Image (spheres, rainbow, N blue to C red):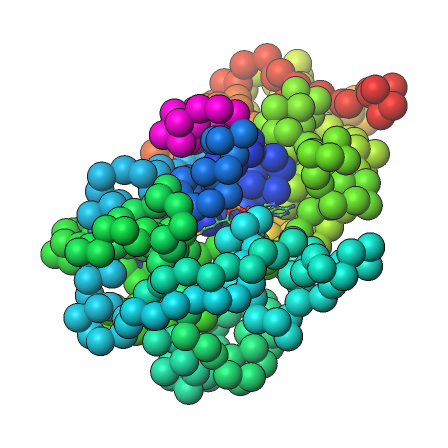
Amino acid sequence: MTTEKPPFYITTPIYYVNGTPHIGHVYTSVACDVMARFKRLDGYDVKFLTGTDEHGLKVKQSADKQGVSPQKFVDDVSQTFEDVLTLMNISHDDFIRTTQERHIKSAQHFWTQLEKEGMIYAGNYSGWYSVRDEAYYTESELTTCPDNKEIKIAPTGATCEWVEEESYFFKLSAYGDKLLDFYEKNPDFIQPNSIKNEIISFVKRGLKDLSISRTSFDWGIPVPNHEQHIMYVWIDALTNYITALGYPDKDTSDFQKFWPANVHMVGKEITRFHCIFWPAFLMAADLPLPHTVFAHGWWTVEGEKMSKSLGNVIHPKDLVDRYGVDQSRYFLLKAIPFGNDGNFSHDQAITRINADLANGLGNLVQRTLSMVYKNCETVIPERVNLTPEDAALLEQSHSTIHTIRPLFDQFQYHRALEEIWRLVSAANTYVDEQAPWALKKTDFERMKVVLAVLVEVIRCLGLLTQPFMPDSASKILDQLKIPADQREFKHLTQEYAIGQGTCIDLPEGIFPRIMEEEKTA
Ligand code: ME8
């Protein structure tokens, strides 16, 4: 009997193509990738979507600055985002671009649905707009620039300009109570709680109708039947999450299986769009609402906001050249509690990678497998006559998955890593206490049992680290000759424990130590 796998749909924001990708973008993509891989290994049917947001004034202005057509510009920059996904070993199932035909059709249909429901009306917009945020702001939200009182500044620090133009509006003001009711009935919809509280107080202050079309430039999706208008970039962009499932066709197997999404992962600066506008649009279009929007924090670099002008932008390739792909993935998720802001520092990256990966996990694997290779004629020995210490360590290896599963459900990546590294430490303490190198001379049979226990712990560590460090975990599992069809979390049991008699190859180091002099490089 085959039972159907439960679905799990996770999305990143689609990234603006006005600049090249940096560690902020990579952070969200890695976090989603780790979740997607975790769920696949845990028996889910996963759909993982990412892509690029290619319309709007910000992108148009960037293209103009380079003197190329917007289409040529977005084609080139979108490719750099795809390349970074490959670089970081991201396992997305689909890459959506908002200039694709499938998306234009979907966004236009979505608009038509809102119009049919009577939720759109024509009017004139006059107010403040930030091109950098692609967002409208009310006067009361703005401050003035200390050097020039004429310049209005949004809460994000972006400058705003005064806009007056013909526009269509979405009746957002009709959704305040409905949204508050929805947040109350679905306490997991907005996470973490700090963001939920901000959104609730914003909605409670009263929602204004939202301008959803522009007429002063043309780089966007034409509004159906009113082609002098293009859609506001956010109504276009948010629709990507359903386009990728086949919308407007709601009968596709993907739409049936994966909508509503389990998680929209976003940075904290775009929660208003995802937690207010998007659910209101979906309510208006009579579509179910996603389960969770999780907003993570922001990275600064050596204490400063990343910016081209400060020259402190960290490019993913530099990170990978310096530390390696898996080491970079590990560091990004271990360095700060997910949901909090954090500061990137090379010193911290080196210290953590050396301590946890080179010395912690790497050393455990290397010293254990070298001893098996040299002293047991390359053959994994039998686990017999187990002591209580052996049994306790094996038990911890098989049960860690039960501790980290709920942590994944709460997006607590750093705590899941802490639990896995609790096992690494327990194993390293066990090696030191059991001292197999001494047993080699005094009790060779016991040495073999100690090594056999450690090999099983390493198998479990290989399985558990796969979502975070897929290549390194594969290397560990390959060295142990674990078959490809025995690498899921359901195999973290005694029943699938590594068999005695397996021959291993000469072990190769997995996590090289990063040299101190590179700190100042
Ligand atoms: O907002 N720290 O695109 P965007 C952490 N197109 N995360 C960061 C970051 C940093 N310093 N910088 C960027 C958009 N991010 C819209 C989204 S979705 C329908 C449309 C990450 O290119 C974080 O996930 O400005 C943030 O939300 C996203 O990149 C913003 O990317």
The C terminus lies in quadrant: top right
Pick the front one: 153 or 422 = 153
Pick the front one: 63 or 314 = 63
Query: For this view, does 298 lie left or right of residue 208?
Result: right
* Residue 513 image-quadrant placement: top right
Residue 196, placed above or below residue 422? below
> Residue 39 location, x and y as percent?
41, 50
Q: Is residue 68 magenta?
A: yes
Task: Say if residue 167 shows up in the picture.
Answer: yes
| Numbered marks: total | 0
Q: Identify the residue at image location x=82%, y=55%.
A: 147
> For the stretch drawn in magenta, what is the main secondary structure?
helix
Q: Identify the residue at image location x=39%, y=46%.
A: 217
Q: Is residue 11 magenta?
A: no
Residue 494, placed above or below residue 143? above
* Residue 362 image-quadrant placement: top right
Q: Which residues are magenta?
A: 66-78
> Residue 509 location, x and y as percent?
66, 19
Query: For this view, does 153 lie left or right of residue 222?
Result: right
Q: Identify the residue at image location x=52%, y=66%.
A: 127
Residue 508, placed above or below residue 402? above
Task: Say if residue 457 shows up in the picture.
Answer: no
> Residue 469 location, x and y as percent?
56, 34
